[in-house]
Image (tube, rainbow, N blue to C red):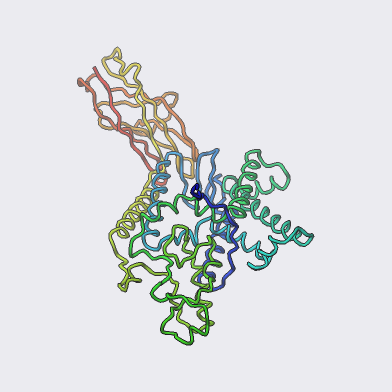
Amino acid sequence: MAEATHSLYADWKKQYPKYQSGFFRNLRWLSILVLLGLYYALPFIRWKRPGDLPNQAVLFDLPERKFYIFDIVIWPQDIFMLALLLIAATLALFFITALAGRVFCGYMCFQTVWTDLFLQVERFFEGNRKRRIKLDQSPWSWNKLARKTAKHLVWLAIGVITAGVFVFYFADAPTLLWGFLTLNAPGAAWVTLLLLTLTTYLMAGFAREQVCIYMCPYARFQGAMFDEDTIIVAYHPDLGEPRQGNRRKRLAAPEKVGLCIDCRECVTACPTGIDIRNGQQYECITCGACIDACNTVKDKLHLPNELIRYTSLREMGGQKTRWFRFRVLAYGSLLTGFLLAIALYLTHRAPVKLNVVHHRQPTFIALSDGSIQNNFTIRALNMSSRTQTYTLEVTGLQGAHVKIAAVETEDASGRPMVTLAPGEVAPFTVYVKQAASARQPGSQDIVFKLASRTPQGGENSYQSVFMRP
């Protein structure tokens, strides 16, 4: 007789999480209001900047390759900061996970926030959990069609608003909004709006917990950052077992039963559909919905609210949680170091950039008067918000004379001067000549120094080499 085969894959079943009020539900509402409020409002906040710079508080200007974040301007030359920011964000995630598990997923992840918003819309049009299940199982009718249509239209509207606001971060928000309303927005904006609308609609409306369980890599490697002191949502089996749902049996022998009455309220409230009583599971997003559900039942039965709670495995074993441990301190120290490095760079970076390239063909030129000339190409960038005039000089080379091609302006000391508008980057050919009386054999290290004539313009230097026979 052939052995029965068992499939390794289970069919997807739609989850119907129950709306559960309580402390952690209110905390999630606060998180949603703050995060969505910031997301939707930031592109429309005006921020006064000097000169002709844009007045949008947060703007990622891709054509100009500049990012404006309030008073901070990120230039293409600061691209390495992207790596620092990504490392800092990763360390922050590691730090939060080692300390409090997947609390980021439960309260701050964009998938969780928008899914929660979509669930509230579904609840508004289709009712509570039981009514939603009954409506899906019932045959199609005008009532069902109207409720489903209204829900999906609101979902699409949220998707359009979400996608539109995202696009506003990359252009002047009021101008682009008027372009959408008058159908005159650029084609790239329409394509981005369509794609992000669809992804928001599909991910938050249909995929939901499947994103957290199967698509998000964080769910898979988060266990590597857990230890016995990590704060997680946990069911306390020593308090809950043995389970007993029969009220008469509980009253007859209360000392022989646990606190769990096997009502399954914690399961129906879970957005990913797991049973927290089965122990720690990677599907748990640490949202606290099961805690609110269990506490609500316990309050009605006048039982202690400690069966499901935020705790650690060490605390469940009767010991105190160790907050200051190596991995937490390591992640925290590294995160602080990267954030300080970013802050120091932004507050101390020079408002002018200088790059120098030595001409290789030829490496040097011997002039008829015995002097030696090297040619260079310098590229200067004015990163300040005002037009600046800079002087160029070379140090480290005795008897040096500097001249910029096609530039006749010099200061009182004979140093050539160039003028750059805000954000302007310009290349110049520079001739550096050493008099015959100061000649020495071999190469010589030199330093180009570009300095503004005003303190606000700053200065910058670049080390190069002067070649000689």
Question: Where is residue 370 drawn, in percent x and y?
Answer: 26, 15
State the residue lying farthest toward the right.
142
Question: Where is residue 467 drawn, in percent x and y?
Answer: 27, 22
Question: Where is residue 380 drawn, in percent x and y?
Answer: 42, 34
Residue at 57 percent of width and 71 percent of height? 20
Q: Nearer the viewer, residue 443 or 244?
A: 244
Question: Where is residue 61 drawn, in percent x and y?
Answer: 54, 43
Residue at 32 percent of width and 60 percent of height? 328
Q: Is residue 376 above or below residue 381?
A: above
State the residue lying farthest toward the left.
441
State the residue lying farthest toward the top.
368
Residue at 73 percent of width and 56 percent of height? 149
Q: Nearer the viewer, residue 344 or 255?
A: 255
Q: Nearer the viewer, residue 410 or 282?
A: 282
Q: Is residue 112 toward the left or the right of residue 430 in the image?
A: right
Q: Quadrant of the C terminus?
A: top left
State the residue lying farthest toward the bottom.
252
Residue at 41 percent of width and 33 percent of height? 417
Q: Is residue 230 above or below residue 183?
A: below
